[in-house]
Amino acid sequence: MALPLVARAQPSTRTYRRRRPEATALYEVVRDNLETLYGAIDDGALAVKLPKHARKELEAYLDCGLLCRGFARLRCACCPESLTVAFSCKGRGFCPSCMGRRMCATAAHLIEDVLPEVALRQWVLTFPFHWRARLAHDGALLSALTRVFVDTVSDLYTSRCGDGAKTGAITVVQRTSSDLRLNPHLHVVFLDGAYRERDGELVWRELPRLTTEDVASALEATLRRIDRHLRRRGGLPASDGLVDADQDGGADQEANLVASAVSGRTPPAGPSWQRGLPQLVGKPLALDKHLCASMDGFTLHAATRAGAQDFQGREALLRYVLRPAIAQERVEQRPDGLVRITLKRAFGDGTVAVDMDPLSLVARLAAAVPPPRFHTVKYAGVLASAHRWRARIAPERPPEKPAAQAEEPLEQREKPKRRGVRRLWAELLARTFAIDVLACPRCSGRRKLVAMVTDPKNVRAYLRGIGEPSDAPERSPSRGPPYWKSTVLRRKALGGGGDDDAWA
């Protein structure tokens, strides 16, 4: 099998520069407001509770990428040049660096080890607004609804490609919208066709032309099946989906945080002020879009497709569905004390950026962290690990090297391709950014790992020697009441009221 174009990037003159998260706006917001959020919760000013896993993720993010928390040391084999690489937090909620690495590694694994060279199509299903708080923490319910949806679309492929045909899908659960409001929704990448077994061989048939009516039929069938499922399990009352953080009175503080992050209208995860463009009268509705349908608060979109020979497009599609919740370059601290998140794409109402209080942003980050054992990537159909056809359609392993080549010097041996998600940091940098981090910039030598420095005394001594800070940036102490930097929220907290429209 030929390697994808992105995997065969040409050598680049770019050199590796260590990232410095402490200099980014997102890091500064978390560092300067985390203790204030803790203090507001402890004082009872905010009737919410931060889950243990969310606290752990926020704390770990403040140590991610800092040399003073430990590092790996690489040294050139031909000269004294060395490189230090800080450890990461391995977060799975919002850390842009760790989630970016997970995105690139998983996409590479899927392209090289799982997906056959066939066309891929993305199906995106979003849920009604008042369901989102429930689905954000009820992993069993979300998994059940995911199976219903995947089975429904699989039936569409089977009916269009013939009896006995089977397709496969990879589901990625994205937990937030681009403004970081809590919004669990499904990105499902289907093989855009189906396999049939004929005379002991698997034969691929691509899906005939998909129409908007097909998408609408799939959505209607999905809603019917979801309704039957919910009736069997007792239903999903509207009151279970959304809890008003102002009126709950602290009965369920963790639910208050989730509900606030869903609505984006009430503290602690709101409000936010949208910065948009002037609107045109008569803007077409979403129902008029190609391969897009909506019904009862659900929306289904299936217009994104990557062809079988579009290697770059296929991997770009997978990276998109696996993307981090937030990008560091889209966060900006404003002179008025608010934080602005610039959207990659404008909302349907013209919104291009959202301003919010720093405490609101930290609360949304906490709500974005998935609970333990909440799986965000799922496989179905012929791509499921237990399916008997998966090994037959998966890309072939590269041929084994002859035994005569086993005596080659270690530096000249070609590394065997591994199967699995875990990939070396240097390999991912070369694949994604065309940066050979192991190449020495001073000579033609290659860097090698020589030490993993974790002892605090050794860390401090080494960092002092190379002129790097040996202590983590100090967190800002908790601010006193009314805690907020937003003037609207400060007036409301102090009993001064405020314009109701400002909470939109």
Image (cartoon, rainbow, N blue to C red):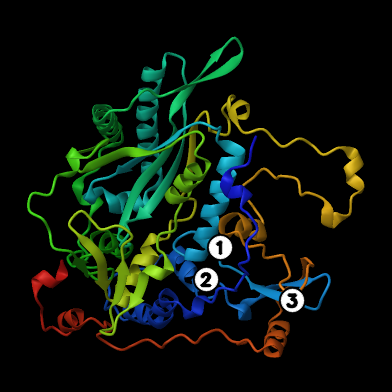
Marks 1 and 2, how far apart at CA: 9 Å
User: Foreground residue, 494 or 301?
Assistant: 301
Q: Position of residue 319 (x, y in %)?
A: 48, 50
Mark 2 lies on residue: 60
Q: Amino acid at mark 1?
A: Lys
Look at the image and tell me whether residue 362 can be seen. no
- Mark 1 vs 3, N-terminal side: 3
Task: Report the quarter where the C terminus lies.
Answer: bottom left
Q: Is residue 450 above or below residue 239?
A: below
Q: Is residue 388 left or right of residue 213?
A: right
Q: Position of residue 27 (x, y in %)?
A: 45, 76
Residue visible at 26% across and 48% down in the picture = 131
| Tag 1 near tag 2, CB within 8 Å | yes
- Give the foreground label among 1 and 3: 3
**The disc label shown at residue 90, or none:** 1
Q: Amino acid at mark 3?
A: Ser
Mark 3 lies on residue: 82
Residue visible at 45% across and 66% down in the picture = 52
- Mark 2 vs 3, N-terminal side: 2
